[in-house]
Image (tube, rainbow, N blue to C red):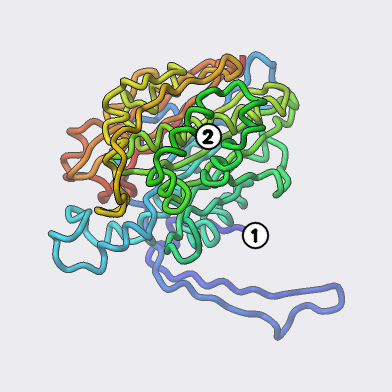
Amino acid sequence: PCYTPTKADVGKVLTVVIIPTRSNHDGRGCGEAYQFKRRVEALPSLPLVRPLREEFLNRPQRQHNHPDGDRTLRVVTYNILADQNASRDVDKDDDANRMYSHCKNEHIVKWRRHPLIIHELLEYRPDVITLQEVDTDVFIGLLKPVLSAKGYEGYYSQKGVDAASGVREGCAIFWSLDVFESVRPVDMRSHSFRDLIQQFMCDERMHQSQWKSLKDMADLLDKHDHLKHVLFNKLGHVLQTVVLTERESKEKLVIGNSHLFYHPMASHIRCLKILIACRQLEIEHKENQHCPMIFCGDFNSHPNSGVMKLLLNRFLESNNGKTWKHLCSYEWEEGMGGELRHDVEAIDLEFPPSFPGFVSAYPEPPDFTHFIEAFVCTLDYILMTNNFVLEKSGATPSREDIKKYVAMPNECMPSDHVSLVCDLKWR
């Protein structure tokens, strides 16, 4: 059973009574009651994104037995700002130490932000949802039960090197069971980049593949001990991949989702991880009749970065100064790199001809998808292979819109990122 509060419930406290029954017992005397702690509040006005995306609202129920030429796939990606990160501000009295000092505590707490995020996602009625910065408890206690009740299936992949790392957030993918068949848990894959790097550095793997850049990467790591140490022992980022089967056509689709390392001096690390991610995507693409692919996420990379040049142009030169600028100087902690070698040279990164090209669902990148007081940039992307034609993509707010509230999150934007949404036509 699923109950959505109505306007009549505003100001009231909801109580849920559960009575277990079976064929020979009506449950009398066995009921349990749970009362919510907070009163029902009216949904706040969302004047920034909603008016820009009217064409994505009130999507009609999917029509089955539709002509093959009229199939539309709606995809949403959203970094929803982990409460693990946002709640650090709530306990700080000094605004100078708060990342979101512009935002009142009453607007940054999770019981206000998360219903707005859920409401926005459900309004779009997407077929595929990819999320980043998802708290473990938010996935278990909110996202999974709510989206399951609305006809979605999905899974969660936690970041972190180990349990002692203190990381309690990660990535999540959901898909509509009205559009796609159910997926066995074993096929909901979570790959740590550490494990993928180890697999792909194997001589036999490289020999069997056309990915020359993997061999060059292995040689680079053999020479650069600190870079290898960071990749294997310090970074716990994950790549999610799942192969979906469309119910009507039985056509398969690979979905990838990731959130890359944020550090401004680590563009070379992000590029190496994208190389690894795309190799894994190609493996699953080939294992499934060379099916279409969609790759989403917060890549922590601006549109002119090395990461996006590699993803969209298939090649990144070793003389791309911005990408490799800190190859020999980046340290996880100051002094931790020991005697950093300065004779390590940058490498070309290239996808082989066997890898299908990606195009962006936002051919003209948004002015920004991330907006905090100290940093404004486009970091989030929806990419697809040429098996799709872009029908439309959702508009994003202007800088002037956000500056009225100083930055994000704010009373109208529950995350420090803007969601992206697009409609794709299957070719």
359 or 61, nearer to the observer: 359
The one nearer the camera, 405 or 227, is 227
Label 1 sits on a secondary structure element that is: loop
Q: Which image quadrant is residue 306 in?
A: top left
Q: Is residue 420 left or right of residue 140?
A: left
62 with respect to 138 (left or right)? right
Q: Give the label on residue 296, or none.
A: none
Residue of label 2:
277
Residue 260, percent from left and from top = 41, 41
Residue at image location 72% in from the left, 38% down from the top: 181
Q: Residue at x 70, y 49 (%)?
A: 185
Per the image, the residue denoted by label 1 is 1
The image quarter containing residue 120 is: top left
- Pinpoint residue 51: horizontal percent, then vertical percent: 33, 33
Marks 1/2: CA distance? 39 Å
Q: Relative to the observer, which residue lies in front, 337 or 180?
A: 337
Q: Is residue 238 visible?
A: yes
Q: Nearer the viewer, mark 1 or mark 2?
A: 2
Judge the density around disc 1: few (<14), some (14-19), many (≥20) Cα neighbours within 10 Å: few
Amino acid on which the number 2 mark rests in the picture: Ala
In the displayed structure image, the side of residue 66 where residue 195 appears, left or right: left
Q: Is 157 drawn above or below residue 318 in the view shown? A: below
The quarter of the picture where the C terminus appears is top right
* x then y, percent, for residue 253: 65, 29
In the displayed structure, 31 sits above or below 345; it is below
Viewport quadrant of the N terminus: bottom right
Residue that appears at 52% across and 56% down: 139
